[in-house]
Image (cartoon, helix red, strand yellow):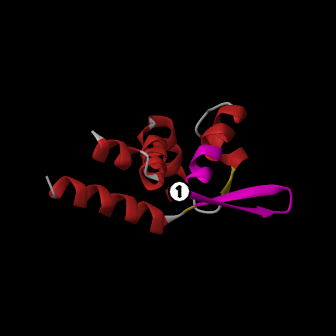
Amino acid sequence: MKKFKNLVENNSLIVSSEILRAVAHPLRLKILEFIDLNPNINVNKIYSSLQLEQSITSQHLRTLRDVGLVNAHREGKYIRYTINYNKIVHIITTVENFLDSE
């Protein structure tokens, strides 16, 4: 049991679970797909195109930003979003390696 406790307390496991939790939400996946099709888009276009509430969209974007799946940069009064493809590829590769090791 001691080995398991040490593994669970590992900071990278906590970070990994946050990233996977962020990716697992259907609405966040929809937002990621939309940003992929419309790179460098602002939150107004995202919520109006997906017919979501602005506050809900902002909350989901914050979660995606916090785990590094999207990049946000200010352009005047707008914040524009792009996907962090390096992080996405890393996640997919890591999960595939984990599944292949079993």
Looking at the picture, tell me which residue is in the foreground, 22 or 7: 7
Q: Quadrant of residue 98?
A: bottom left
User: Taking 50 as reference, is 66 above or below it?
Assistant: below
The picture places residue 84, in percent across and down from the top left corner, at 53, 64
Q: Can residue 48 be spotted in the picture?
A: no
- Direction left: furthest residue: 102
The residue drawn where x is 58% and y is 62% is: 39
User: Taking 43 as reference, is 68 above or below it?
Assistant: below
Q: Label 1's element?
A: loop
Residue type marked 1: Leu
Residue 28: say if magenta. no
Give the magenta part as a residue range: 62-82
The picture places residue 5, in percent across and down from the top left corner, at 36, 42
Q: Few, some or many C-alpha atoms within 10 Å of disc 1 (few <14, some 14-19, many ≥20)? A: many
- The residue that label 1 is drawn on is 69
The residue drawn where x is 35% and y is 49% is: 7
Residue 63: say if magenta. yes
The residue drawn where x is 37% and y is 48% is: 6
Task: Judge left or right: residue 4 versus residue 74.
Answer: left
- Direction bottom: furthest residue: 86
Task: Judge left or right: residue 55 versus residue 14.
Answer: right
Q: Quadrant of residue 62?
A: top right
Q: Quadrant of residue 83?
A: bottom right
Labels in figure, total: 1
